[in-house]
Amino acid sequence: MDHLIAYYRGVSGEHSDWDDYRAAMERERRLVLRITLDRAGPDHHA
């Protein structure tokens, strides 16, 4: 939930009712998925 709130704040600022926002995110089963890439592309070290 902390990541969803941070995302919302970064995009839209403060919400008028954080309890309502939390309830909606739980009801809609929303989540934040973070993917960190260490490398990409063909591996020429084979």
Image: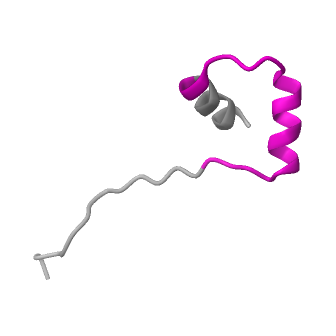
Residue 38 in which image quadrant: bottom left
Q: Quadrant of the C terminus?
A: bottom left
Circle count: 0
Where residue 17 sits in the image (x, y, percent)?
84, 20
Residue that protrudes farthest toward the left in the picture: 44
Q: Determine whether 26 is above or below 17 in the image.
A: below
Q: Is residue 37 left or right of residue 39?
A: right
Residue 41 in which image quadrant: bottom left
Q: Quadrant of the N terminus?
A: top right
Q: How is the image coloured?
A: one colour
Which residue does the image show at 55% across and 28% down from the upper left?
Answer: 11
Q: Determine whether 3 is above or below 41 in the image.
A: above
Region of the chain picked out in magenta, as a range: 10-32
Which residue does the image show at 67% across and 37% down from the upper left?
Answer: 4
Q: Which is nearer the eye, 42 or 46?
A: 42
Q: Is residue 2 left or right of residue 33?
A: right
Is residue 46 located in the magenta-colored stretch of the structure? no
Q: Which is nearer the eye, 16 or 22?
A: 16
Residue 14 in which image quadrant: top right
Where residue 18 sits in the image (x, y, percent)?
81, 23
Q: Which is nearer the eye, 41 or 14?
A: 14
Which residue does the image show at 88% across and 48% down from the upper left?
Answer: 27
Q: Is residue 34 left or right of residue 24?
A: left
Which residue does the image show at 25% across and 64% down from the upper left?
Answer: 40
Q: Determine whether 3 is above or below 26 in the image.
A: above
Residue that protrudes farthest toward the bottom in the picture: 46
Where residue 32 sits in the image (x, y, percent)?
62, 47
